[in-house]
């Protein structure tokens, strides 16, 4: 894209700046539209499971319901509690929203179609996703209210707990691919199926890691059945209790952007990303970004289905699963995957 702007007579520096801004907008605007649509899909899935209709009035089939809700919160007054820390109270949703968008900079939508194709893309995402907890913690503390504060403490413990097991899961992926670059990880999945299945669908050796990663993704994004940070029967609405108007909406946008990010990582790390599901020539006629979006949508349907059907865990069950089940299992699989690679690839 830089070359295109240079052909218009701009210097390299100016062309690079315009190309970067254009790339950011090409990701941010469709992502915001996608967030609005997946909120609609989320509500439709919940309604279908509960034998209800869901949104069906605003626009055809209720498609404009999310935009109507967005307009409603935009026109509302932002109320700041008198005892709250005003500066941090307003910064918290901005932090959550900004961090959620920043992670998409290294997501490859096709071969070479990525804003920042850096060699440590996976490490970048791991670091960015770890920063998401700061918005929640700041919101809980700045509200100067006991229920948001309890929620913030829960969120900090929950996200840190599951990031440990996610880290070991990602080690297995990196050992297999031999790179932290997300495009390289996708390319490493070509044809690897231990001779049983095509690796474009999934990697047999890493399949148990995907199951743990999917469940850890739910916990990392505080989705049901791990939504202990927003448990309405215990904490009213958790860290969002004192928020209203656009500051509340930014939390929602950030949450769903994070959910879509985790769906994208499930597709990229374990299911071939922008590669077609089978190594069959006609499937390559479909652009890679369509395959990636289809896989993201599939995983989002799994997220919605789980939220609509699985009851919320108790907090002790949540922590036990992270520390006593996932952590030992992920450590065992690091040994197994590295041993298998030493035996078959390097032995």
Image: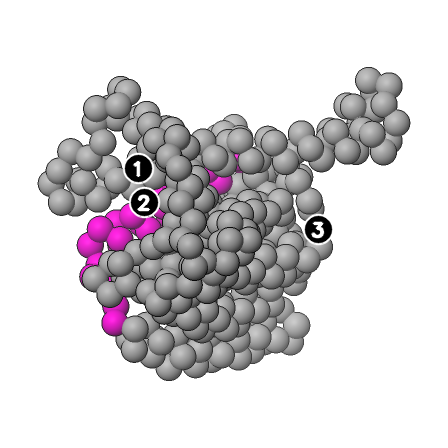
2 or 3: tag closer to the N-terminus: 3
Q: Is residue 252 above or below residue 130?
A: above
Labels 1, 3: front one: 1
Q: Regarding mark 2 in the picture, which secondary structure is present there?
A: helix
Q: Nearer the viewer, residue 166 or 189?
A: 166
Q: Residue at x 61, y 52 (%)?
A: 182
In this view, the residue farthest toward the left is 51
Q: Quadrant of residue 65?
A: top left
Query: How many C-alpha atoms fall within 10 Å of the one at disc 3: few (<14), some, or many (≥20)?
Result: some
Q: Is residue 187 visible?
A: no
Numbered circle sitting on residue 301: 2
Gap in Å between the C-alphas at discs 1 and 2? 8 Å
Query: How many C-alpha atoms fall within 10 Å of the one at disc 1: few (<14), some, or many (≥20)?
Result: some
Q: Nearer the viewer, residue 343 or 329?
A: 329
In this view, the residue farthest toward the top is 8
1 or 2: tag closer to the N-terminus: 1
Q: Which residues are magenta?
A: 288-314
Instruction: Residue 210 in the image: state x and y as whole percent.
Output: 42, 61
From the image, which quarter does the C terminus lie in? bottom right
Numbered circle sitting on residue 41: 1
């Amino acid at each position: 894209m830089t070359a295109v702007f240079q052909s218009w007579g701009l210097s390299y520096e100016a062309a690079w700046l315009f190309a970067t801004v254009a790339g950011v907008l090409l990701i941010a605007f469709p992502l915001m539209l996608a967030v609005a649509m997946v909120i609609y899909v989320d509500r439709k899935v919940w309604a279908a499971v509960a034998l209800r209709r869901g949104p069906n009035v605003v626009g055809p089939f209720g498609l404009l319901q999310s935009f109507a809700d967005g307009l409603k919160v935009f026109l509302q007054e932002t109320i700041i509690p008198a005892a709250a820390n005003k500066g941090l109270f307003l910064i918290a949703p901005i932090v959550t929203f900004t961090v959620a968008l920043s992670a998409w900079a290294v997501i490859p939508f096709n071969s070479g179609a990525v804003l920042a194709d850096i060699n440590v893309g996976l490490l970048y995402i791991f670091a960015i996703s770890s920063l998401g907890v700061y918005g929640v913690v700041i919101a809980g503390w700045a509200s100067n209210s006991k229920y948001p504060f309890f929620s913030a403490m829960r969120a900090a413990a929950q996200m840190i707990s599951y990031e440990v097991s996610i880290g070991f899961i990602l080690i297995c992926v990196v050992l297999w691919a031999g790179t932290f670059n997300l495009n390289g990880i996708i390319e490493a999945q070509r044809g690897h199926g231990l001779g049983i299945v095509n690796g474009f669908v999934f990697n047999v050796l890493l399949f148990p890691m995907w199951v743990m990663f999917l469940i850890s993704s739910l916990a990392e994004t505080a989705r049901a059945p791990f939504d202990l940070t927003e448990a309405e029967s215990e904490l009213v609405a958790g860290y969002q209790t004192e928020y209203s108007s656009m500051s509340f909406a930014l939390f929602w946008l950030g949450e769903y952007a994070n959910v879509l990010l985790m769906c994208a990582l499930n597709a990229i790390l374990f299911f071939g990303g922008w590669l077609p599901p089978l190594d069959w020539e006609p499937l390559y006629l479909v652009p890679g970004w369509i395959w990636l979006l289809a896989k993201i949508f599939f995983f989002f349907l799994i997220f919605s289905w789980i939220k609509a059907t699985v009851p919320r865990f108790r907090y002790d069950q949540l922590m036990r699963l992270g520390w006593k089940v996932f952590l030992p299992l992920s450590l065992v699989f690091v040994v197994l995957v590295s041993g298998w690679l030493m035996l078959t690839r390097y032995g």
